[in-house]
Every structure is written in structure tokens, then in C-alpha cells.
Image: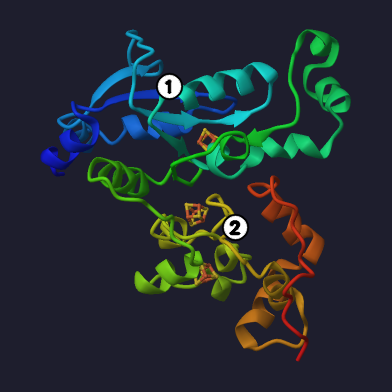
Amino acid sequence: MAADTTRARFGHRPQVAFFDFACCEGCQLSVLQLEEKLLEILEHVDVVTWREAMSEHSNEYDIAFCEGSITREEDVRRIKRIRQEAEILVTLGSCASGGCHNELKNKWSMDEMLELVYGDHADSIETGPSRPISAVVPVDYRTYGCPVSLPEFVSVIKHILTGQQYEPPNQPVCVECKLNDHLCVLEKGEVCLGPVTRCGCGAICTAYGEPCQGCRGLMDSANVGAMLKALTREQAHAIVRRVVEGHRLSESDIMDRLRVYNNWQELTPEEGAADDE
Ligand code: SF4
Ligand code: SF4
Ligand code: SF4
């Protein structure tokens, strides 16, 4: 990393803070697991606030990494204050950047959801519909994944310190799957959400023979309808036919899988659906 460029941008070693909102905090934990790479990053920045890793705290920082979803009025006030204080705000992981499974609760009314989860204690819990941070304040850089894809986290840090913008990749996981020569799990008759999911994780799941569950969220212009048709139609080429016969899932079952990580956007499978041939 170029220390001169960093100093020119911030005028000093940049001060970094980590914040969490509604989430499991697994993204912060993953960043801690960078170990030696983290030590290398720490040669270029001063971490001044990171509740999961240290007891010191400061309200003066240049770069804020924010994890989790916004669910309460208090969260809205807090993220707006962080936005004002930070020169650069980075969303950490899919809860913060695009939704993730926190938004599953939005399918129920809040009263119903509170009773389902907290029973007799529902009255003492303050919560509301869940939103990604990117839906509440402007964001400078986004990282995706549940947990966050660490190569993307490191890449974003490098982009910030060298004064470059970072555009998350906007291709399907299938691209990285093919680039890395992974066997397509469709051949095992499994449903894989890679064709509509934003790549950038190196297709790590399919590397181990597991289907993509869509944790990095939908890529822009994902053709969900075409994927559903391909995975459920009976008139299909041999591989897809094996999938259809193997999984026996309906379009609605596959949509339910897709919604685990994609509840913030309204999914409209009809749009852009491939024509029946
Ligand atoms: S994106 Fe996943 S790992 Fe990260 S905080 Fe949210 S739920 Fe946890
Ligand atoms: S395994 Fe999944 S991500 Fe990889 S090529 Fe097949 S459908 Fe695409
Ligand atoms: S392969 Fe899919 S589920 Fe696995 S890390 Fe990548 S985007 Fe997430």
C-alpha cells in the first residue's frame, strides 16, 4: 500500500472505527481472523474504536466500517451521527450492504413477529422493520457476503488508502466458478443460486462442492425468472433435467431459498424471464 498517497489523502495516518448494528457480528469476527494480513493493514491505519476487539473508544475517526442492519429509531440517529463524523463510510457484509436474512422478519407484522420471537416479553422489545445501512445513509464503499468476503474487505482497504473508488463486481458467481475450474454442482442435481448472485467471493462454496446460497445478494439485473425456468422446466437439456428430477423443488421453493439473503429488494421473477422455447 502506498503510505504517501494515504498521507496525502488524510493528512495523517487514517483513524479507523468499527461499529455494529443489528447482526450476529460475524463479519467483524471474520476480519479479526485475517490475522497476519490484519497486522499488515495496521501498519497503515490506527484503529481507534472496535468494541469486539479492544476497550478503547474515540469519537474521532476518518473511516467507519459499519456492520449490521437498521431496525430502531435509535439506530437511525446513530448511523446518521457516524455518517457526519466519518469522511468515509464502508458497509461491512451483506446485512449492512444489501439486506441479508435480518429482513426475513419484514415478512410479518412487527407485533406478530415480536410475539413469535419474544412471547411474553414482546412488550419490552423495541424494534421495527429491518433495512440495510445503505438504505438509510449514503455509503462510500460496500462489501458483501455473510460473513463478509475477506479478499473484498482487503481490496476495499487498499482502494481507500490509495484514493480509488471501488465498484463491487457485478457478475454471477458462475463466472468465478468457471475461472477456478470448479465442478458445477448442477451436475449433482443440486439447486445453486450462483447464476443470479453477485460474485466476489471466489466461488468459495462451490469450491467445496456446495451450492451457492446467494449470501452476497443479487447482482444488478439478475435474471431470476430465467433461472427459475431453467431449474424447473421439464423441457430441458440433460444436465438441467437431472437437476429438476433430483431436487423436485417448485419455483416457489427456490424463491424461498433466494429470499433468505434477498428480502430488501422486491423479487419479481416474472421480469426479464427467458421465453419458453
Ligand atoms: S452479514 Fe452475516 S456474518 Fe455478517 S453480521 Fe450479517 S449475519 Fe452476521
Ligand atoms: S456451481 Fe453454481 S455458481 Fe458454479 S457454475 Fe454451476 S450454477 Fe454457476
Ligand atoms: S458461493 Fe454464494 S453462498 Fe458461497 S460465499 Fe459466494 S456468494 Fe456466498
Q: Which residue is mark 1?
A: 85
As rendered, which of 245 and 149 lies closer to the eye? 149
As rendered, which of 120 and 90 lies closer to the eye? 90
User: Of helix, strand and loop, which one carries label 1?
Assistant: helix
Residue 41: x and y in percent read 21, 34
Q: Residue at x 79, y 66 (%)?
A: 251
Q: How many marks?
A: 2
Amino acid of disc 1: Glu
Q: Is residue 143 above or below residue 250?
A: above
For label 1, being within 8 Å of ligand 1 is answered no
Q: Is residue 98 visible?
A: yes
Q: Residue 193: which disc? A: none
Relative side of 214 to 183, left or right = right
Residue 204: x and y in percent read 41, 56
Q: Residue at x 66, y 74 (%)?
A: 243
Residue 256: x and y in percent read 75, 53
As rendered, which of 59 and 95 lies closer to the eye? 59
Q: Quadrant of residue 100?
A: top right
Q: Is residue 151 above or below residue 105?
A: below
Residue 262: x and y in percent read 66, 50
Q: Residue at x 63, y 87 (%)?
A: 238
Instruction: Name the residue furthest bottom.
Output: 277
For label 2, being within 8 Å of ligand 3 is answered no
Q: CA distance from mark 2 to mark 1?
A: 31 Å
Q: Quadrant of residue 229?
A: bottom right
User: Of helix, strand and loop, which one carries label 2?
Assistant: loop
Relative side of 258 to 207, left or right = right
Query: Which comes sooner in the sequence, label 2 or label 1?
Result: 1
- Identify the image quadrant of the C terminus: bottom right
Q: Is residue 61 above or below residue 173?
A: above
Q: Which residue is mark 2?
A: 218
